[in-house]
Amino acid sequence: MSNNRKKTVIFLAFVSLVLLTIILAGFVITLQRKQTQKPSKKPNVNLKTQYENPFDKKTQYVNPFSQYKNPFNNLR
């Protein structure tokens, strides 16, 4: 083997080793991120008392343009 060919083989081996190291480091980093970003669980908290609306239902505002209790729906 000539001296020039030996240098080329050593250079290619070095470049491939560097690329392999970079790919391996990226793989390890992505695995670590997946392990730390576990899906968060929503807390399950039971209410001690049930909420009741303190206002009179008859006096509450109703949007006249909504489909809920719209008096103009009967005109169609």
Image (spheres, rainbow, N blue to C red):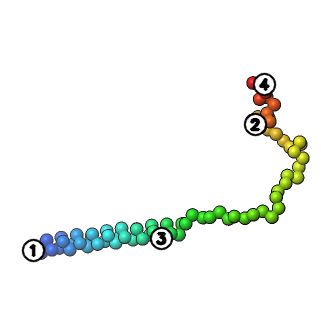
Q: Are marks 1 and 4 in contact (CB under 8 Å)?
A: no
- The secondary structure type at the circle numbered 1 is loop
Quadrant of the rendered structure where residue 60 is?
Answer: top right
Q: Which of the two discs, 3 and 2, labels the residue nearer the N terminus?
A: 3
Report the quarter where the C terminus lies: top right
- Residue 16 location in percent, x, y? 27, 69
Q: Is residue 63 above or below residue 72?
A: below
Q: Amino acid at mark 4?
A: Leu
- Residue 56 location in percent, x, y? 90, 47
Give the number of the disc on residue 66.
Answer: 2
Q: Is residue 73 above or below residue 39?
A: above
Give the number of the disc on residue 32.
Answer: 3
- Position of 28 with respect to 76 (left or right) is left
Which residue extends farthest top? 76
- Residue 41 location in percent, x, y? 62, 64
CA neighbours of label 1 inside 10 A, class few (<14), some (14 to 19), many (20+): few
Q: Which of the two discs, 4 and 2, labels the residue nearer the N terminus?
A: 2
Foreground label between 4 and 2: 4
Q: Which of the two discs, 1 and 4, labels the residue nearer the N terminus?
A: 1
Quadrant of the rendered structure where residue 65 is?
Answer: top right
Q: Is residue 47 above or below residue 10?
A: above
Foreground label between 3 and 4: 4
